[in-house]
Image (cartoon, rainbow, N blue to C red):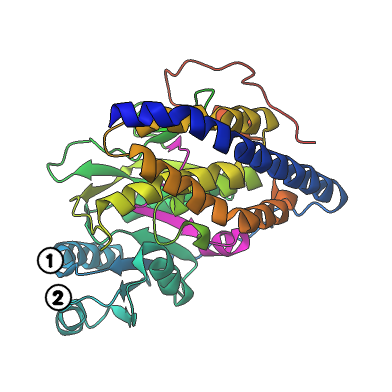
């Protein structure tokens, strides 16, 4: 397999390099157009009044009866102890394990939305959000179990008008902090690298900025969510829609926080799409392309990423679990969405207040080596 990849590398460099150049040209043109529209008619974020202390919890389920049997009692008990006027919405993606009957029988207070087909996470969570009625949205995975007292710290942090959303600290099923929700990303000169890092100061319990709100459980102001345009269908059926939403919030001038005093347990019972894990890996890489092309405005970062992307694809082709065919499939799947990416990029440009480099500074993980030019960059 390695010999085949090596023999195809020169051909791939020859064939894909012009495509990368075309993509870069189109992204630069869209960026220039967006900057001009921002100069002529900027659209600054509204000043919303403080949200009411009422939450709509939205959970997407597909054959998740066993998970919900563990997560829903803990959630409802926590909400009863809180005493607020909250609602819980479960979207059932046409499960075949009797999830809908189980919820109706055991949890009549929950609003159940039945989908006629499996919408997966993206469209499923948007369906639930469309039915939400409270000021605060709490998006929660079906395999998350909340700890007592998890809600109050989230709501306290969310009352700050500068904050878009707040995520809980995520523990593993063993109750140890493996997947913290302390999310960060760095640009390594080629592409973005993602990480979950230890809490910066666990002894203080202070909240801290994060690159994205971990979708295990996070709360956002519904009005700000709607103003941003919500979770983007470009990423359907799933993966990275939470990263995209958080990054748009940062660009518009809000912040995203991790609240370590709010703790939830992630039981890691992933529902893999019927197409299999290979399809899931393809989606991950496809959506990473989409995120970069849609959101990164720094022209030097765009140029570096795209001019070296063919070389990066060749390197990835020899990595087990990725492969040549899967890498190409993810690239061309993203390429099919390029017209929509360009349109959304230009339309959102009027709302941008922060540069990419500024966001990377604001969300830098503690102890990271500072890259060059970590200074506030004025948008033109």
Q: Is residue 365 magenta?
A: no
Image vertical order of residue 87 relative to residue 10, above or below: below
**Relative depth, front residue between 196 and 72:** 196
Residue positioned 40% across, 62% down in the render: 237
**Relative depth, front residue between 182 and 271:** 271
Q: Which quadrant, please, contains the C terminus?
A: top right
Image vertical order of residue 26 relative to residue 176, above or below: below
Residue at the farthest right position: 40
Which of the numbered marks, if any, corresponds to residue 66? 1
Residue positioned 64% across, 37% down in the render: 18
Distance in Å between CA atoms under marks 2 and 1: 9 Å
Image vertical order of residue 65 relative to residue 167, above or below: below
Query: Can the viewer see residue 316?
Result: yes
Q: How many marks?
A: 2
Does the CB distance between marks 2 and 1 fall below 8 Å? Answer: yes
From which residue to which does the magenta span run?
208-230
Crowding at label 1, few (<14), some or many (≥20) Cα neighbours within 10 Å? Answer: some
For residue 70, what is the image quadrant?
bottom left
- Residue 323: x and y in percent read 33, 38
- Residue 264: x and y in percent read 25, 49
């Amino acid at each position: 397999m390695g010999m085949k990849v090596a023999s195809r590398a020169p051909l791939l460099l020859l064939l894909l390099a012009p495509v990368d150049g075309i993509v870069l040209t189109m992204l630069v043109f869209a960026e220039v157009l967006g900057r001009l529209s921002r100069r002529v008619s900027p659209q600054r974020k509204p000043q919303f009044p403080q949200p009411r202390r009422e939450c709509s919890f939205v959970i997407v389920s597909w054959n998740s009866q066993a998970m919900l049997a563990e997560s829903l009692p803990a959630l409802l008990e926590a909400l009863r102890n809180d005493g607020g006027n909250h609602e819980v919405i479960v979207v059932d993606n046409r499960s075949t394990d009797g999830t809908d009957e189980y919820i109706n029988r055991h949890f009549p207070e929950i609003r159940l939305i039945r989908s006629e087909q499996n919408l997966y996470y993206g469209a499923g969570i948007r369906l639930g959000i469309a039915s939400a009625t409270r000021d605060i949205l709490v998006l929660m995975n079906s395999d998350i179990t909340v700890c007592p007292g998890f809600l109050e710290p989230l709501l306290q942090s969310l009352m700050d008008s500068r904050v878009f959303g707040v995520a809980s600290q995520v523990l593993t099923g063993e109750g140890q902090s493996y997947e913290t929700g302390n999310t960060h990303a760095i640009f390594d000169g080629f592409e973005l690298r993602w990480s979950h890092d230890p809490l910066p100061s666990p002894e203080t319990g202070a909240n801290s900025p994060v690159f994205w709100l971990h979708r295990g459980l996070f709360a956002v102001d519904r009005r700000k969510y709607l103003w941003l345009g919500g979770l983007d269908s470009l990423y359907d059926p799933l993966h990275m829609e939470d990263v995209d939403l958080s990054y748009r919030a940062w660009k518009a001038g809000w912040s995203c926080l991790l609240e370590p005093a709010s703790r939830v347990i992630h039981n890691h019972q992933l529902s893999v799409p019927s197409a299999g894990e290979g399809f899931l890996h393809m989606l991950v890489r496809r959506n990473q392309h989409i995120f970069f092309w849609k959101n990164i405005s720094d022209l030097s970062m765009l140029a570096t990423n795209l001019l070296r992307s063919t070389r990066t694809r060749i390197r990835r082709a020899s990595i087990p679990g990725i492969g040549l065919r899967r890498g190409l499939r993810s690239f061309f799947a993203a390429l099919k969405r390029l017209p929509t990416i360009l349109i959304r990029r230009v339309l959102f440009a009027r709302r941008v207040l922060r540069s990419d480099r500024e966001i990377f500074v604001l969300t830098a993980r503690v102890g990271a080596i500072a890259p060059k030019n970590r200074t506030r960059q004025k948008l033109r």
